[in-house]
Image (cartoon, rainbow, N blue to C red):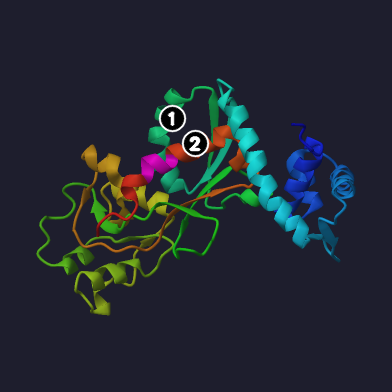
Amino acid sequence: MSRRLPPLNALRAFEAAGRHESFSRAAEELGVSHSAISRHVRGLEDRLSTRLFRDLARGVQLTVDGAAYLEQITPALDSIAEATDRVTEQPAGVVMVNSEPLFATKWLIPRLSEFHAAHPEIEIRLEGSRWLADVSRYEADIAIRFLKVAGSDPDAVLLSNAPLHPFAAPGLVDLPLARPRDLARHTLMRDRSTGTWGVWFACAGEHDPEIVPSIGWRMRSYLAYEVTLAGQGVFLTSSEVTCLDVAAGRLQRLSDVGFREGGYYLLLGEGARRRKPVRLFRDWLMDRTAPHRDEPI
């Protein structure tokens, strides 16, 4: 039976424009001009004898017919892309990753050789920055960021929400702790979260606000971690970033008392998620971080 199919380029133009509700962003994603997107969409509307978009003062908006069509076309194009990937032996490509520096240095970098061994044809370009890339503007394919409030970004997928515990270099603190307040005798490292030590002491049953020294060493988390490794302080951090140093005997957990402050989350760009190399790296990340999701406190 013969299929009535519109031109593939018209469908790709419509689908990208529909996802973004923007001809300009669709043109940027597909690497063509704004006028090319407009021409393909208008041609598709003529072929279907219906309006797929309505013009607004700024941009476009899907019509009822356009939204219904997009709902069917997006998974259809995804299926074609996935079928194409399956018959491609090597999904060669570059994946741009932008990550919180602490997660990048203590979790991701030590494990990148594992991913490379499984997928030597994929190049990972990693940037560790506290100014995280905007995946919606194609500054990175994948962004890994720390969010304090679950759901503050509806597109974010949880990688790890391991609870915070106090860690220090072996020998700095006499263990077991006689009282949680004994930790206040040591230099308490602080990062961007000024109140985390107060929360920890409260969880440990110490509710006196005077316990936490008013003066401490405050610096970015990846620097505070290095100072802690050097034996100069105690730092509240989570198991996904400390596990290798704990296993090597460079750090030790000082108390079983912990609490959750947030978690590391994964964000993908719309166009990036349709690329096989990005999906492979995403799936690997999700699999390897699984032990750190919803760890018992």
- Cβ atoms at labels 2 and 1 below 8 Å apart: yes
Q: What residue do we see at 34% from left, 69% from top? A: 215
Decide which of 75, 93 is in the foreground and name it.
75
How far across and down, in percent of the image, does residue 66 sit?
76, 56
154 with respect to 252 (left or right): right
Q: Is residue 4 left or right of residue 109?
A: right
- Where's the N terminus, which quadrant? top right
Q: Element type at marker 1? A: helix
Q: Amino acid at mark 2?
A: Phe
Q: Which mark is residue 115?
A: 1
The kind of residue on which mark 1 rests is Phe
Residue depicted at x 40% and y 61%: 262
* Nearer to us in this view, 228 or 21: 21
Residue at screen point 48% across, 25% down: 119
- How packed is label 1: few (under 14 Cα within 10 Å), some, or many (20 or more)? some
Residue 204 pos. (x, y %): 20, 69
277 to 264, vertically: above or below? above
View extreme (front): residue: 1
Q: Is residue 138 visible?
A: no
Q: Is residue 21 magenta?
A: no
**Residues under labels 2 and 1: Cα distance?**
8 Å
Question: Judging from the image, what secondary structure is the residue with disc 2 in?
Answer: helix
The quadrant of the picture occupied by the C terminus is bottom left
Residue where numbered disc 2 is placed: 281
Q: Which residues are magenta?
A: 285-289
Q: Is residue 73 visible?
A: yes
| Residue 245 picture quarter | top left
The answer to which of marks 2 and 1 sits earlier in the sequence is 1
Magenta stretch, main secondary structure, is helix
